[in-house]
Every structure is written in C-alpha cells, then in structure tokens.
C-alpha cells in the first residue's frame, strides 16, 4: 500500500474511474444555480450541469471548499499513517489553494502534508495529480513526487478555445460590446494561463478551425521534434471539433499518448458550453 496519499479538488477534471483506480482523494467545490447548491462532480456531474445550463435564466456561481473540508480529509489520511501531497487549482483563480493551506496549518506540527499551487486549471493540473498518484502507487517519496509535479507544471502548454463569448462577458472578462461584435464575426478567443497561474487572452481567430490551426502552429514551433502526451477536454453535449483538433495534433507532433476528459461544472460555469481545452506535456526524451 502506498505511503503517500494524493489529494486534489474537483476542478482537476479527473474522471471518476481514474480517481478511483489511483486512490486520489477529491474535495469538491460547489456550484450554485440560484438557491440550489451542488457538489461539483459528486451531486452534479458534467453532463447534468450542461443540461441545466441553458434552462437557467441567470449565471451559475461557484464557491471554494472550506478549510474544514480539507482538514477532515488530511486528518483521515494522516491517521492512516500517510504522508499527503495536495495539489490544487491556481491560487490566482480561486481561494481553494488557500483553504487547503489553512487546513494544513491547523494540523499538529511535524505532520507531513505538502500543499501545491498548480498554477493551472482543469486537466492542466489533473495530469499532475494523476502522475503524482501513479508515483505514489509505485512507492515514490513525497519529495520525489513534489519535484516531478513542479517539473511537469513548468512543461505544460495549455489552451482553451472558447465557443461562446456570453460567459466571458457575464463573468466580466470582456465588455458587452466586444461580446456582441465577437459573436457577429464568429470570433473564437484562445485563452491560456501564464506561469503565475493567471488566465490571459493568448490570441483570437475567426472560427474554430482557424483557432485550432493557430494553436498547432505555435506548438509545432515551440516543441519541435520532442514527443508529447496531450489531453483534450470538452463539454458534454458540445464536442464538435475535438476529433479534428486531435487529428491536427497527431499530424503535426510526435504524439505518444492522448486522453480525453470532460470540462467539469466549475470550469464550465466560467468558460461556457462548447469550450475545448488542450493540455500538452512534452516528454523528457524519446
């Protein structure tokens, strides 16, 4: 049995079967449709969220777990004799990391719990969590796991192609006039996340296909002949373009493995339906 336990939160967008197989503990954020409150990826699954979204007149909101939520998980795992590595959504986007850090401070001195700011979102850090859990399963030390997570975090290339500007506008990221004009011109924003974990507008293109082509162009120039693994994340019921992007990447890059996952309710509440996330990890060697 692994001596290191891996903890994360629901915005890592790791499929349930993968979390279960690797023994990953997940603390959920909350999604609120007005007065109705749901636990992300527990009482509200991605497909249910995207079915509810167009029927709701307002804008769903989200909230972070409390320190008490994390404390309960940390105490349980420590009582089992585990060291804990806890990896979370970018602190620049949410107080989730801070809640986990506060929970750690409430433990007895000397308790072996490490809390990491992924400086990323969705499966951009979900892959970090999965790798950490695989290393823990294979007997790696907490120090080795933390070092590999930090290395992978620096290697990640991440892009979101947003299908509709409505949610960026409602969330205050763009103005209403820009949203209206962008919709008329079929503008697809390409978002990324910088080294500090802050979302920024990387580029934009007229139409999804041109947005994909721009991403592939940048990756080809940046990565060159290095082999890569990548994951594409889509919103259930709105997967148009994912197969096309996958094919473009396989033709342009030396792809060794790829995965597919869903963009969960919390990320979807801010990015909107039809968003496609791409998470590319160059490998160390051939």
Image: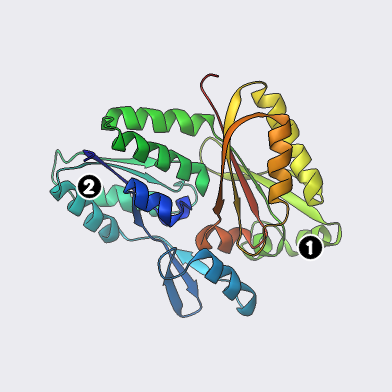
Q: Residue, x 48% and y 65% (percent of image)? A: 62
Toward which corner of the image does residue 224 lie, by quadrant? top right
Horizontal relation, residue 6 to residue 74: left or right = right
Q: Residue, x 62% and y 48% (percent of image)? A: 277
> Can you say which quadrant of the picture contains the C terminus?
top right
Horizontal relation, residue 122 to residue 115: left or right = right
Say which mark, if any, is on residue 105.
Answer: 2
Toward which corner of the image does residue 279 lie, by quadrant? top right
Q: Assess disc 1: are there few (<14), some (14-19) or many (≥20) residues with their C-alpha within 10 Å of its C-alpha.
A: few
Q: Residue furthest right?
A: 185
Q: Which element type, helix, strand or loop, lies under badge 2?
A: helix
- The tag earlier along the polypeptide, 1 or 2, is 2
Q: Position of residue 197 (x, y in %)?
A: 51, 41
Q: Which element type, helix, strand or loop, lies under badge 1?
A: helix
Whether residue 41 is visible, yes or no, is: yes
Give the Cα distance between marks 1 and 2.
46 Å
Q: Is residue 241 above or below residue 54?
A: above
Whether residue 215 is visible, yes or no, is: no
Q: Position of residue 118 (x, y in %)?
A: 44, 41
Q: Position of residue 219 (x, y in %)?
A: 68, 31
Q: Residue, x 29% and y 28% (percent of image)? A: 143
Q: Is residue 235 above or below residue 14?
A: below
Say which mark, if any, is on residue 45.
Answer: none
Q: Assess disc 2: are there few (<14), some (14-19) or many (≥20) residues with their C-alpha within 10 Å of its C-alpha.
A: some
Please give the residue where the numbered disc 1 appears in the rendered image.
Answer: 177
Toward which corner of the image does residue 114 lie, by quadrant? top left
């Amino acid at each position: 049995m692994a001596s290191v336990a891996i903890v994360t939160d629901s915005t890592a967008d790791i499929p349930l079967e993968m979390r279960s197989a690797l023994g990953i503990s997940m603390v959920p954020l909350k999604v609120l449709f007005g007065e109705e409150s749901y636990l992300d990826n527990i009482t509200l699954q991605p497909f249910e969220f995207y079915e509810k979204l167009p029927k709701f007149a307002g804008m769903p909101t989200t909230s972070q777990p409390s320190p008490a939520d994390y404390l309960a998980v940390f105490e349980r795992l420590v009582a089992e004799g585990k060291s804990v590595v806890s990896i979370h959504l970018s602190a620049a986007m949410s107080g989730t990391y801070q809640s986990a850090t506060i929970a750690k401070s409430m433990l007895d001195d000397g308790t072996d719990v490490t809390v990491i700011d992924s400086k990323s979102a969705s499966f951009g850090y979900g892959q970090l969590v999965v790798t950490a859990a695989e290393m823990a399963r294979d007997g790696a030390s907490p120090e080795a796991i933390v070092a590999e997570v930090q290395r992978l975090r620096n290697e990640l290339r991440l892009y979101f192609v947003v299908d509709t500007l409505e949610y960026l506008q409602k969330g205050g990221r763009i103005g209403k006039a820009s949203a209206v004009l962008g919709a008329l011109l079929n503008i697809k924003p390409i978002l990324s996340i910088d080294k500090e974990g802050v979302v920024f507008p990387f580029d934009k293109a007229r139409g999804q296909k041109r947005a994909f082509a721009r991403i592939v162009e940048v990756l080809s120039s940046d990565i060159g002949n290095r082999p890569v693994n990548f994951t594409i994340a889509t919103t259930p019921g709105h997967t148009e373009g994912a197969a096309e992007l996958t094919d473009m990447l396989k033709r342009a890059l030396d792809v060794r493995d790829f995965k597919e996952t869903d963009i969960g309710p919390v990320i979807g509440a801010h990015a909107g339906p039809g968003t496609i996330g791409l998470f590319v990890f160059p490998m160390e060697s051939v």
